[in-house]
Amino acid sequence: MHERSSIRDHVAIVTGSTDGIGLATALRFADEGAKVAIMGRDPERGSAALATVTAHGDAIFVQGDAAQKEDVDLLFARTLGTWGRLDILVNCAGGFVEVSDIEGLDEAEWEKIVDWNLTSCYLATQAAAAPMKEKGYGRIVNVSSISARDALANVSLVYSAAKSAMQGFTRRLSVELAPHGITVNAVAPGVTLTKRFRLVHQERVPQIVANLPVGFGGEPEDIADAIWYFSTPGSGYVTGATIDVNGGQYVN
Ligand SMILES: NC(=O)c1ccc[n+]([C@@H]2O[C@H](COP(=O)([O-])OP(=O)(O)OC[C@H]3O[C@@H](n4cnc5c(N)ncnc54)[C@H](O)[C@@H]3O)[C@@H](O)[C@H]2O)c1
């Protein structure tokens, strides 16, 4: 493999990686020879994910909530303690549960969704800055959403707001960290057929997919491919950018 695209022996942290897009990314990294720290809240799902990823490469699982500072600190301590370096951070933890209108959106829901999607990104990125700056190299990839790029009525309002803020965070931070050899980019997935997506949308899935310009739904691996590109040494001239991976549903 060409050196520019090789992440062999690089160390990666992927938050929210016991399932879906995060797990597909961890697997992709392991297949490429990187060492991966996976993180999630559920220990059982974590053990299962760890078994899957270690069949492909070197990995650890750290149980925790990416929106809690103590848990994020533990994740970084375990990763740096195990491998002594950090090259890649993928902020993948996030999601939403309810779709409320503005009057139905209470403060508890607001705070929870901002915490899951935005605070988690801030905490892990802050923890990554020092070890990456010290090395003069880093790749930070934020998993945003099509709902930060276009107005989608069937998506949570606070989720759209948090993912849009993640885009601003990505742009602004990219300029701050560029002189340190660290890139900060975002991937904005559209419909991605994870287990959770199929569970939430059930019998509506065929119709949702049929409405996409490409006529098929994205798989977690399609998103992992874009994340992988931003994680490689060869993507170093790209920072503050977003790749839309959405089957043509939103075209800028
Ligand atoms: N699936 C889609 O269609 C889609 C579309 C656009 C964006 N996204 C984004 O992609 C990311 C991954 O979504 P997915 O669909 O793969 O989700 P998923 O629910 O299939 O998997 C997410 C994993 O992350 C974990 N997780 C979530 N919040 C966490 C937290 N605070 N701390 C630790 N672990 C946490 C979950 O437990 C789960 O294991 C999310 O940020 C989501 O908003 C997904």
Image (cartoon, rainbow, N blue to C red):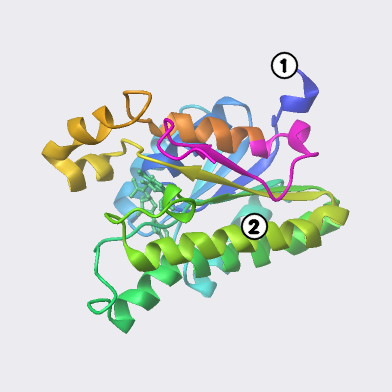
Magenta residues?
230-252
Q: Is mark 2 within 8 Å of ligand 1?
A: no
The answer to whether residue 182 is above or below residue 71 is above
Quarter of the image with the C terminus is top right
Q: Main secondary structure of the magenta part?
A: loop
Secondary structure of the residue carrying numbered label 2? helix
Q: How many marks?
A: 2
The answer to whether residue 79 is above or below residue 51 is below
Lower position in the chain sequence, tag 1 or tag 2: 1
To which residue does mark 1 refer?
1
Residue 228 horizontal/vertical position (percent): 60, 34
Residue 151 horizontal/vertical position (percent): 39, 55
Q: Amino acid at mark 1?
A: Met
Q: Amino acid at mark 2?
A: Thr
Q: Residue at x 66, y 39 (%)?
A: 231
Residue 21 horizontal/vertical position (percent): 42, 41
Closer to us: 34 or 89: 89
Q: Residue at x 26, y 40 (%)?
A: 195
Q: Is residue 104 left or right of residue 68?
A: left
To which residue does mark 2 refer?
170
Residue 250 counted in the magenta span: yes
Q: Residue at x 42, y 30 (%)?
A: 247
- The outermost residue toward the bottom is 107
Residue 187 horizontal/vertical position (percent): 55, 44
Residue 55 counted in the magenta span: no
Residue 159 visible in rendering: yes
